[in-house]
Amino acid sequence: MLLVTATLLRHRHRHRLRHLRHHIRLKSTSPSTPQHYHLPLNHPTYLIWSANTSLGKTLVSTGISASFLLQPPSPASHSTKLLYLKPLQTGFPSDSDSRFVFSKLDSLSLRLRVPLSVSNSVLRSSLPRSGIRENGMRDLNFLEEKVVTGAAAELSCKTLYAWEAAISPHLAAERENAPVEDSDVLKMVEQCLREEMECGNKTNLLCLVETAGGVASPGPSGSLQCDLYRPLRLPGVLVGDGRLGGISGTIAAYESLKLRGYDVAAVVFEDHGLVNEVPLTSYLRNKVPVLVLPPVPKDPSDDLIEWFVESDGVFKALKEVMVSAYLERVKRLNGMAKQAGEVFWWPFTQHKLVPEETVTVIDSRCGENFSVYKGSGNDSITQQFDACASWWTQGPDPAFQAELAREMGYTAARFGHVMFPENVYEPALKCAEILLDGVGKGWASRVYFSDNGSTAIEIALKMAFRKFCVDHEAILNFSEGSEEKKHIVVKVLALRGSYHGDTLGAMEAQAPSPYTGFLQQPWYTGRGLFLDPPTVFLSNGAWNLSLPESFSEIAPEEYGTFSTRDEIFDKSRDTSILATIYSAYVSKQLQEYSGVAQSAHVGALIIEPVIHGAGGMHMVDPLFQRVLVNECRNRKIPVIFDEVFTGFWRLGVETTAELLGCKPDIACFAKLMTGGMIPLAVTLATDAVFDSFSGDSKLKALLHGHSYSAHAMGCATAAKAIEWFKDIETNHNIIPQGGILRELWDEELVQKISCHSVVQRVVVLGTLFALELKVDASNSGYASLYAKSLLEMLREDGIFMRPLGNVVYLMCGPCTSPEICRELLSKLYKRLGEFNRA
């Protein structure tokens, strides 16, 4: 009997765990619509945290309130108000923290003879109406208040959501059929804080938001409260534990908050005679004040009024710390834009075109949103969707960001940094295994680590050139002691409009462009044969193929348009007349180049598969690139895929080799590989490429490397990010059959935008939506400022974009919901109309 009962209990436990994980996954980690919050910063607001339940958060909130409100008013002082919010309350109505603060402040005001108006309200509750339990929360709108005529101080207490059962909010919400989503809690908190802005600057205001239970106690959706409130990133006060074992719990709570990017202004706890403040102060290295309250009377009949009076000095000190930290934060935020313009040298930026008022001051990031500071007398923190994915690197939602932060923290603590040559450690090995089983599956056998995309390209060029030389017997007789000097000139075959990085060698592998001019790179010569590629784009609702002048003799009816985007990637096109034309063209170009430059050889093909990113978000005809690969293979010219931008589901597939239907010899990856959390790049290669460096002399090895090659933090983060992206449990956009992304951009809106009168062309694929604005020749290209006013309007709509001249684009992450993408397109479409009329 006992065995059966134990089995049933274990089954129930597993079922509840699965239910909770599913609930958290659906309700918390993947919001289906954009969640943008606008928080006033003209008054200090603090979260009151606790290392655990029953440590006195509400006592601390009450003490702070008293120290702030119950001071004898001076003749010139402004009115004073404190807003106390309790977003989540269980055990209601017998237990109500907002009522405790309300009643104690009323009693203290009488005790200290300081006039105070007080109010307490409960907005929503699961309590049954007329004794009948109903599903869901209902408006309670309970209010009790005491207005004192002539009082210069006011306390407003509010409970936002209340459940009857005295248990954790996630259990109460489930048992009482009264769920509340994280976004609802945050919106309600935001609304209450914004309403207080109506008090104006003549009111001295302080806002406290008291959490429920401990730092990591679940909220009503099941997500931890330290995750629930993270989008707001309000600074906090941590109520620690002065009891035996409290040091450990307080430090764990503090680290949980810091790991999620919270600022903690102070730690405060009740004295239990164990001097816990000494080791805590040592651990915090005096950076965070640790304050100790007198022991709380244990007699239940004690109303604690005298204890609050006795504790006034500690609470005044705590209040001063909070106000000082707030003033310092605002001062720093207000001065950052000016100072940045004086000390930074921003990349790809003409500083004369960036006045101080246009500098975006980013306070933090949560998932896909920047938290941006807005000053000019109406201080606030507002959110903007990072629609350029911070130069194409970003992928995490808030839950993913927290997961990667934990992985990075663990790895940094375990490894720090260790050198890579002739060594092995778990993060690097696991990362390599995942890469070879993913983007390199079926062709790659070796992983070469570096630090960024441009250097990954230079490594790839060295690999390709060596392979070419070996295959063409240029250095077969090389030996360390040989005096014979062999030298051949090798160049690349590449496409005009491609971009492979900013370092000198990578720039040599691309055609002349604004990035390679004399003022940018005086050494530039352009070491390659550069071909104009055919491109594909959406215009007026149809996918069109645009051929360069090299193909001017081909009549449009011979290639036509495409009914769908999928037709562009259909491999049946390989047998078309156009494929034959492409092949003949490439072959002719290679032959003519060899004839003209007899001393030079095309030693590598390098392409950005499918999309040319920095070159203007052009989609290259995949048939043309496939023909290029085949022609080079026939000539034993190594093939390099530059997937620094396009890899890891940026274009809807793990690797664009899946879209092209052909494999490289060498491929480079970076950016999204680590979820955008930390720089790391890799160059993957075949066994044949690796073997071309094999020999008895070290001088035949690949003599290239970086101090931080295969750094453990980057490798661990990349492994975690790739696993997260491809797991259907964490990335809801992954289609299990094939591991590709579902369509993220609303087809109807895409079609409408492609038909807009100001739009020249549209490219949409995977996480990318790009459009080129119609302009005359003088306004086109990378230096164009034509899109500036459009981008300013979109930033007002909460969308941060950075243009490529007259090309603007939206870029989401592989985990972004289609609903968010639709919202972005809707705002863009609306603003295009206003931009057209401007």
Image (cartoon, rainbow, N blue to C red):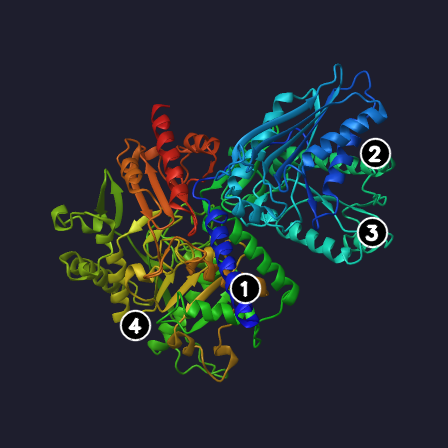
Residue flagged by tag 1: what amino acid is it? Answer: Leu
Residue 718 location, x and y as percent? 50, 61
Q: Residue at x 30, y 72 (%)?
A: 636
Secondary structure type for disc 4: loop
* Disc 3 versus disc 1: nearer the observer: 1
Q: Which residue is mark 1?
A: 9
Quarter of the image with the C terminus is top left
Nearest to N terminus: mark 1 or mark 4 = 1
Residue flagged by tag 3: what amino acid is it? Answer: Glu
Secondary structure type for disc 3: helix
**In the visual, does 439 lie left or right of 364?**
left
Residue 660 location, x and y as percent? 29, 60
Rendered view: 377 above or below 276:
above
Q: Which residue is mark 2?
A: 305
Q: Residue at x 79, y 47 (%)?
A: 269
Say which mark, if any, is on residue 531.
Answer: none
Q: Which residue is mark 4?
A: 636
Nearest to N terminus: mark 2 or mark 1 = 1
Q: Which residue is mark 3?
A: 277
How many angstroms separate mark 2 from mark 3 (CA)?
25 Å
Residue flagged by tag 4: what amino acid is it? Answer: Lys
Residue flagged by tag 2: what amino acid is it? Answer: Ile
Nearest to N terminus: mark 2 or mark 4 = 2
